[in-house]
Amino acid sequence: MTIWMLDETHDPQTESWVSSANRVSCDFALQNLPYGVAAAGDAAKPVIVVAIGDQALNLSACAQEGLLDRLFGADARSILCRDDLNALMARSPAEWRALRLWLHRALRAGSEMQSSIEGFLLPIESLEMRIPARIGDYTDFYCSVEHATNVGRLFRPDNPLLPNFKSLPVGYHGRASSIVVSNSPVRRPNGQIRVDGDIVFAPSRMLDYELELGAFIGGGKNDTGVHPLPEARERLFGVCLVNDWSARDIQAWEYQPLGPFLSKSFATTISPWVVTMDALAPFRVAARERLADDPALLDYLADKDEAGGGALNVDLTVHLQSAAMRKKGEAPLTVTRANAAGLYWTFAQMITHHMSNGCPVLPGDLIASGTISGETPGSQGCLLELTRRGAEPLDLGNGESRSFLQDGDEIVLEGRCEREGFRAIGFGECRGAVLPASDWS
Ligand code: CA
């Protein structure tokens, strides 16, 4: 049985009694139901919430009231009355699907449950969103062949793509401690950089964003070291947007021979809503086709289901608003439009490869895709590519230009899934603005 099945929760005709969810442009339609963690008001303890239109259902309160006992028995409160999604992530795909069905039936128009849960709705705009899970480990991959080629070409014009790229999903171990949620300011890092041949310690002059998707791991603990793709697929809980802020000048000096380090670990911003794999089921598409002269996939990274539906058709955009634009009330400029379906590796392949040496991955771990770039102009997922390492600055259309980010610049990532015959769903926002570097002098 494929775990990407469609059921009544994907029916595009069904509407919600929360009327804002029924607007065509709404990210959080009844067919989405993403999870988050939020505090309502200063003193409130954070709770688990589910987005529906411009409202959020307090799922912790529903569980406290005993409404989820039928699904989870005595465990309902320990899973849902808490300030992270880890315990829910640790359950099985069958239980995730049962909870989604319960939410769908509770929130759809005409539900007999409306009167018992409408008191648990909170306006999203009144919420302070938090990191949705306690992220034990964060691994960032490098799965876009366009990104890898574009970046490689800047440094190795004759040989842009390294020989391992098409044999395995290349990744590195990121820092979970510096992951922040959307709307958190990001301070420009200080670091060791090369300026005119001298090595100095100074604020980064080449601060960049990276457009990525992140997948939260679910399920139990792997302890056998043998996890074929079907198990990896079942351990995918849901997806969020990721901005992997990068200081290119720090990176250029430090990255050899062990890869990026302080150029990445100062901040990574994630969107607060976790869009579940069940919500994404209609938007699964065939994994990117491998070319005739690509190396053959090793068996542990290949099966029919992954080839047929391992990729996610998510339209992604990056918007930039400078401090001057904000001051004048000018709208942000869209600087990147890309789609996640073109990634060379799928999330299940990344997880399979990650676990293939016996490395435990745990509920709440975050796996990011790497910068998502396409082939066409304007589809590059970071400024390093868009401006060819600053050589071709980006015209912001208001007299300003950017080689890299300046203080006060705000970056907003958005993601949306659309398919004929289905309700569109979205990811909300992943937003962060750049603060000046700390003064070390
Ligand atoms: Ca990255």
Image (cartoon, grey):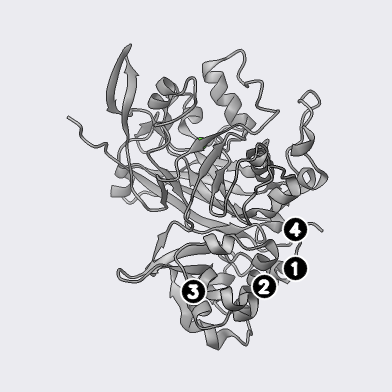
Amino acid type, callout 3: Ser
Amino acid type, callout 2: Leu
Distance from Cα at disc 3 to Cα at disc 1? 25 Å
Q: Nearer the viewer, mark 1 or mark 4?
A: 4
Report the residue at 72% width, 46% height from top.
310
Residue 290: x and y, percent?
A: 76, 32
Element assignment for label 4: loop
Determine which residue is flagged by label 3. 60
Report the residue at 40% width, 67% height from top.
46
Q: Please state if 178 lies on the left or on the right of 162 as rendered.
A: left
Amino acid type, callout 4: Ile
Element assignment for label 2: helix
Report the residue at 69% width, 69% height from top.
9
Q: Give the quadrant of residue 24.
A: bottom right
Residue 94: x and y, percent?
A: 70, 65
Determine which residue is flagged by label 4. 3
Element assignment for label 1: loop
Query: Which badge, 3 or 4, is on the more N-terminal residue?
Result: 4
Q: Please state if 403 lies on the left or on the right of 200 as rendered.
A: right
Element assignment for label 3: helix
- Disc number placed over residue 7 in the picture, else none: 1
- Disc number placed over residue 278 in the picture, else none: none
Distance from Cα at disc 1 to Cα at disc 2? 9 Å
